[in-house]
Image (cartoon, coloured by chain):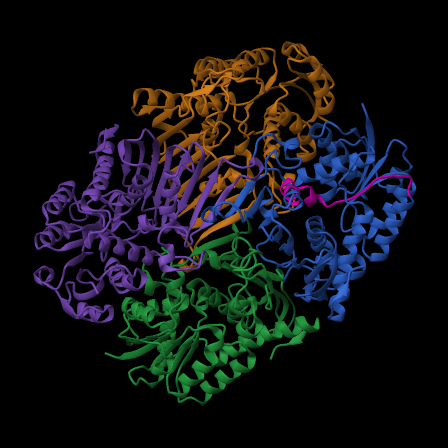
Chain colours: A orange, B purple, C green, D blue
Amino acid sequence: MERIGVGLIGTGFMGKCHAMAYGAVKAVFGDVPVIDRVALCDVDQGHTRKRAEEWGFARATTDWRDLLANSEIALVSITSPNGLHREMAVAALDAGKHVWCEKPMALTLADAEAMTQAAAKANGQATALGYGYLRNPALQYAKRLIEEGAIGEAFDFRGSVDEDYMADPDLAWSWRLKAREAGLGTLGDLTVHLISLAQELMGPIASLTAMVDVVHEERPVPGGHERAKVENDDIAHALLRFASGARGVMTSSRVAHGRKNGLKVEVHGSKGMLWLDNERMNELNLYLAEGPPERRGFRRILSAPHHADYGRLCPAPGHGLGFNELKVIELAELLYGVTGRPSASVTFAQGLEIEKVIHAFARSAAKGQWVRVG
Amino acid sequence: MERIGVGLIGTGFMGKCHAMAYGAVKAVFGDVPVIDRVALCDVDQGHTRKRAEEWGFARATTDWRDLLANSEIALVSITSPNGLHREMAVAALDAGKHVWCEKPMALTLADAEAMTQAAAKANGQATALGYGYLRNPALQYAKRLIEEGAIGEAFDFRGSVDEDYMADPDLAWSWRLKAREAGLGTLGDLTVHLISLAQELMGPIASLTAMVDVVHEERPVPGGHERAKVENDDIAHALLRFASGARGVMTSSRVAHGRKNGLKVEVHGSKGMLWLDNERMNELNLYLAEGPPERRGFRRILSAPHHADYGRLCPAPGHGLGFNELKVIELAELLYGVTGRPSASVTFAQGLEIEKVIHAFARSAAKGQWVRVG
Amino acid sequence: MERIGVGLIGTGFMGKCHAMAYGAVKAVFGDVPVIDRVALCDVDQGHTRKRAEEWGFARATTDWRDLLANSEIALVSITSPNGLHREMAVAALDAGKHVWCEKPMALTLADAEAMTQAAAKANGQATALGYGYLRNPALQYAKRLIEEGAIGEAFDFRGSVDEDYMADPDLAWSWRLKAREAGLGTLGDLTVHLISLAQELMGPIASLTAMVDVVHEERPVPGGHERAKVENDDIAHALLRFASGARGVMTSSRVAHGRKNGLKVEVHGSKGMLWLDNERMNELNLYLAEGPPERRGFRRILSAPHHADYGRLCPAPGHGLGFNELKVIELAELLYGVTGRPSASVTFAQGLEIEKVIHAFARSAAKGQWVRVG
Amino acid sequence: MERIGVGLIGTGFMGKCHAMAYGAVKAVFGDVPVIDRVALCDVDQGHTRKRAEEWGFARATTDWRDLLANSEIALVSITSPNGLHREMAVAALDAGKHVWCEKPMALTLADAEAMTQAAAKANGQATALGYGYLRNPALQYAKRLIEEGAIGEAFDFRGSVDEDYMADPDLAWSWRLKAREAGLGTLGDLTVHLISLAQELMGPIASLTAMVDVVHEERPVPGGHERAKVENDDIAHALLRFASGARGVMTSSRVAHGRKNGLKVEVHGSKGMLWLDNERMNELNLYLAEGPPERRGFRRILSAPHHADYGRLCPAPGHGLGFNELKVIELAELLYGVTGRPSASVTFAQGLEIEKVIHAFARSAAKGQWVRVG
């Protein structure tokens, strides 16, 4: 029985997601290696040891380089703050490890390029970025419908990604709002997901014109009476041209009251339309301009074993997958890559293309002009 | 009892809407004049006479100038093809008539300006353009919520207007696709409605950058094997800056399979969000960032007598108004204007501001740059 | 040009609905007689005269027998309190008038039977009861789908009708809660509508077992400190057997917070399912067990000119009809009956069948047993 | 660190669910014992060994009694066919094991009673039945709202549970349709879930009157031209009286085309209403009759860390849990019971109360009368 040792850096939201995925993937996908959870790493030793016990890791460490030095570990998960991704990922690749790194890839385009170069020079290791929404069976089925021509030529794209975690203007300032430490704001946190879906369904984005704004310009500094400046973007909107000739629009906001996981995509085709909304992630809405006109309407298709990997997780249609389960599928794809099989992972090279788009947003907004991506 | 004589030009979709509104308005709104339906005009005498009988008009004519010469007529409805609006409206104003003219206002900005000048020079007559969606009680309640500060500062706008009447690529070519005869395409048919709603909720649009495209570039000429070129726009998208400092996005399409009256607006505020969709025109969706966080969610508010003019038409909440009934409210507002009371009509002067925006779309798209409106 | 003179008794919610329908029907349906609004009747002379002027009636009266004596009037609308229906309807029929009477038909089954007998003895006059929801194009299209076999054999029915006009337990007591003056409660106000839809789609109800309850047993008497007993039903639920062999369930409530026009029907068939909700009356939801399984889902069909009489009111799909417009279609059907054409009116004889069902509810609930209808 | 050894009987849909839950529970809920997956049991040795490897069980066996004899195993999962539950559960309890048994509890009421007696005589072991939908944070939040009085007195309940796994009339006959081998049909498969939710929100059901029908009376026998009789129920509907004095209605069907996990509950209260639909299991719909009337509407509350155990699985609101994750929460509750803490498990004693209700359905339907439960 094939086995693989893994190490995980980070014990936050995404760290736990990775840990849960490691615990589940073999039971869900029988055709992947057995996972040996070798070591967990975070900055606080006591906390990390406790998590290691709960999450089934054999060892806890506060030095991430321990993981790279450990020959039992073949795959390293990086869920640390974004500013550390480059250093850790490059070092992990140099140490011969496969790398599963959360998004956004890095703070700067230069960092993302360095990571991609490290992956290119590596000795065949797999890389994967945390674009789990791509693995949603409803989204994959949408992709299949487009590829099969069900909606004809896809010529218009509408996408939005809205959440409200920064919507309260009185929410405290933090380092996450500082450009040098946190990089881009909404673009890095949210827009990257939207771009990943747009490119999955429509192909590469060729050019765009964007507006990138801070809405709530200052926020209160915790524990005092001062207010500090917000340095990264709350909102990012753009008009797009795809390489295919199609066009579209993207809107993004982290200050959108009421939206919790408001990632929506809509594709207009010459024979039909489809759309999805992550807040109802087990549904695909499809309109086909076929059959008797009086019977036409958007149909709400509930995810089911017919659709992509749904059946791996659940044999009962409409019973619903959760956010965490998309990470299990994401991991399975990485493990396919690790074991030399065809894989749908978003590699570093592919992730760099996403980074180029968000940086094109920033460039376009700064100039007030259309720009080419890349 | 106050009375007013009316004449109606046009017997198509909008002609019938005006006729139904004339037949209903006094019963619905007791505080307007009694309507005397004096004369109906269209090009075919037999057809027009038949419609006049059905619609309750005393006379039928094929010469629209008859209506202007008729001293019993104080108000003229213009529902003829857009290319005739300027000539008819200017002549009607010159003849001292009040004018109710369908949208879009005219084929060109110059024509719209001429109409506005004629209205400015007129002797106090009222003008109104057919922006009936503004009269939707759900939309008016949204406006009131914004004015009352319920959602705080409104800083982001998302709007779309999508229909599918031209979505079939094999639909026959017609004169409506010829720029000189029909003017703009989606911009004139659909985007003007979206602009009217956007400005109602957010105030004037100051600048924008747009893409305006023909998607289905040729269409079959009826009765032959040839294909003719489509000269006006299928799709129009834009990023916007409002005079208030707010921003937003608009998308429009007449080739959007599945959308029948897909006019949606969404306003993001610092304390909440609201949105509406004309396909469910009796609903307003509202999220307020107040009260216990665990109880927050978008609430679906069904239109009811609490909301604007709903109660004039129906005392029972949630029973629903229809598209035609918005035209009745639109007419009542015009009649308020005619009788010297405060009126919410979209006058020619206000309509010109909408025309300026669609022409700014066209200019921006041609240049590939941000442009100022006006 | 064919003409018909009409008289209207009542100036409340339904009176205004009838008045609006009289004002609209000829413009909407060209193939009906021209309506002459001869006289309006209600108890207060000044109020009635004012309404007559607004609603276009030539005369006002406070004596409903004036209408019966008036030879210009061929059709009488009865929208008075339910307790007066029998006397007025029988007298109108005896006077040779066609009768359009609001629902519920009467306070008691004996009254409804008397009305039906009067109609049977009449000289060919048409009768119609106010079951406007039957005329909803979405409902009629549902009926057509069932008749065409689109969903196979219809074997299970689920229906509910919920509103909240009495939901507040502190709402004041009124005569409408007194059995002798108002008759049944929810059964007469709401359940009759649900039964009309159930029978339209499924055929006659053969037997049922019901629970009929008062929930808020006492209510405050206005202007005092006392509380009076509520004598008629707040809630009525039943299991049903249809004559066809199908089965089903009905629930009704006038104390259902949040429901404004919550009339829903759902039909389960051997090849599909369909459902409608009056709060979104321009939508029909249809699931067909055909085509590729992975593409199946409930489709939301927006009412359009394809569907029944929608196109009479609006040529644009998805633009939406309102509650009042269903009454226009209802009136057109009556006028077809009046002029000897096939008519879909709910005649007194058909209305009696509905009354038998609500009285079967009451009998069953009193006995705690299954009962046969009729 | 506390540990517990587990054995699992069954490798089907539910077997895999239990396996996934065992693999996840410690990572999700830190405060439960570490799980040692000791042995897996099913009838085919090769298949069971393969699954054991994938699911992380140390051993595979084809004799379920091996698990009872194994002192390393303290907790046994029973996911075998329903007809085996009684024998296995009683033996497991007699062997001193904690028992997690899938629903429905048993084929007959006598079997369920025997299981309950075995649990009562046991030496303090915990029992739990597979009512995972009770653990849905949205449902638990609904319960909390009712307990807090948010919707006032809960007086009316509407519930339905519809799926379409037997909706195709040509689906092949199987032993599952034989009463002696499979017990009840829809009542055992689906209605039990609905009852569990109804009693969670409304308290015990006191009496009911039901209709229980086979719709598709014969089905084709695989591999031949014969048709065999369906012996258990396709459809089960009932009117209910709760011990609290509230009332309600339940509908159930396994032949409901289009429904995939159509488990819906709706509670009407004197101050508001709430409803949930398992096909959108991360949403609770709530109407409160408070605040300005014009702002009232059903609000769609997305599950979030505010709600019950959601935050254990995901710190991000609205990101959504899946069906499988409810089983993880279900297991955590059982482990609380195992370790002597307060537990929300549905014990055998509580499950018996659910069985009594479905058997009351059958009794009532057979008699055509109201019956008392129990």
Q: How many marks?
A: 0
Left or right: where C79 falls relative to D46:
left
The range drawn in magenta is D122-143
A177 or D1, nearer to the observer: A177
The image quadrant where one finds the N terminus of chain B is bottom left
> In the picture shown, does residue A7 fall above or below A161?
above
**Residue D365 horizontal/vertical position (percent):** 73, 67
Left or right: where A333 falls relative to C78:
right
**Residue A283 horizontal/vertical position (percent):** 53, 44
B244 or A270, nearer to the observer: B244
Left or right: where D69 falls relative to D298:
right
Residue D133 is one of the magenta-drawn residues? yes
> In the picture shown, does residue C72 fall above or below B76?
below
Evaluate whether residue A153 shows in this view: no
C194 or D43, nearer to the observer: C194
Q: Which residue shows up at 56% across the image and 36% down it?
A: B292
Dividing the picture into quadrants, the one containing residue D281 is top right
Evaluate whether residue B97 shows in this view: yes
> In the picture shown, does residue D125 fall above or below A68?
below
Residue C256 is one of the magenta-drawn residues? no
**Residue A357 horizontal/vertical position (percent):** 41, 24
The image quadrant where one finds the C terminus of chain B is top left
Furthest residue to the front?
C224
A91 or C195, nearer to the observer: C195
**Residue D233 horizontal/vertical position (percent):** 71, 62
> In the picture shown, does residue D123 fall above or below C157?
above
